[in-house]
Image: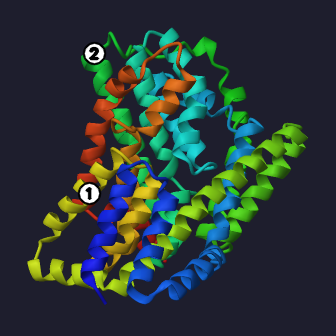
Amino acid sequence: MSVATGFAGVILLFLLLAARVPVALALIAVPVVGIAWLLGWTPAIGILASTPFDFVSNWTLSAVPMFLLMGFVAYHSGLTGGLFDAAKAVLRKVPGALAISSIFACSGFAAVCGSSLATAAAMGRIAIPEMIKSGYSASFASGSIAAGGTIGALIPPSILMIVYGVFAETSVTQVFLGGITIGLLTAVAYSIVVLITCWLRPDIAPPRPLDAADIDTRKALLEIWPVIVLMLLVFGGMFSGFFTATEAGAAGAMGAILISTATRRLSWSTFRRAMIETLMTSSSLFIIGVGAAMFTRFLGLTGLTGFLAGAVNGAELSYVELMLLIVALYLVLGMFMEPFGAMLVTLPVLLPILNAQSISLVWFGVLVVKLLEIGMITPPVGLNVFVIKNVAARYVTVVQVFKGVIPFLLVDLLVVAVVIVFPDVVLFLPNALK
């Protein structure tokens, strides 16, 4: 074992990422070269040959393409199109009704999607023009949708949570249960931001309620029955123990296809587009996962993970000090890396430390996904911000969107603090439904 080689590998990895080398390529290249340095090229090539199959053949990972297919079919066939109108019908009397409706519509879309980018794009196209027409500033309207999109990876089914569960070797269903709480807590916190803004700055967020005459409540609520059926099918089956997370994904995908077909919303071109996007997204995630699995093996061979766990124990860091270091790490990485890369680069180092400190991996999975999603609206590489800029280019600039997300970023940090200080906020449902 060579701890120095492990440190050199970590440094080289971050140098490659800083040089804009693709995450998957960097994660594969470093362990191959590192293992060749330690053991020779034959073992290095052997690990390169065996790891892809060992990783991709993991049964739990088959949930990823299934949930992705469910989300893409639901999105492209228009099953989720009525969520915004339904939220408006329910929340029409609340100050800032349009902004709050968009946030809860994002939560509903998240339940059949699992991607924050897709959530932000879908809701941005629908909600931003209507909010601006109703007197919201373009910056605040776009910022609320960019922030609301992050709920897409918090409320299950979350692709990030599935991959985390595989790497942490912990129950995906338990992590999903924790994600429900933090997803809803985030939606409520964002809604409070809207209410406060309506009170303090009515010039950028009009507090007036929506005109009931413009909303057909019965029609709006009937429009979302496909989403409710899919949620009951997936969540009911999974959390009752009837389905595993993987089986729930398959049932959800089939449910989305059958409902779309029955309602005559699924054409061959729509299905083909959903399949292609599912295959492209799954393959890009899996190749990054293969690289992360190889990097984990490399760090194990060097002894770096054990060394770091021992060093943290020896430093006798308090729980709060350790959490502050982890939060700072992910906030910095989130400024420059996409979530999957940031998570899979750091987990091989952090998981042994967390195990040594007896910290719940279910709780940490929810926390780390929340931190990664904060990175989606953090400059300079906040991916949700650029998605919103693309779908609302006629209304806002990138700078305006970043300005609009600032109050939501601040409340996100407050949510993180609550989760750290009160872990039972996340663990209540997982513990209650074991």
Q: Earlier in the sequence, mark 1 or mark 2?
A: 2
Q: From mark 1 to mark 2, how far is it between C-alphas?
A: 34 Å
At label 2, which amino acid type do we have? Answer: Arg
Residue nearest the viewer, comparing 81 with 346? 346
What's the residue at 45%, 17% (across, down)?
Answer: 396
Q: Is residue 21 above or below residue 41?
A: above
Q: Which residue is mark 1?
A: 329
Q: Residue at x 36, y 65 (%)?
A: 346
Where residue 154 sits in the image (x, y, percent)? 47, 52
User: Where is 48 relative to 201, above or below?
Assistant: below
Residue receiving disc 2 = 201
Image vertical order of residue 144 relative to residue 110, above or below? above
Q: How is the image coloured?
A: rainbow
Look at label 1 and name its amino acid.
Leu
Residue 241 quadrant: bottom right
Secondary structure found at label 2: loop
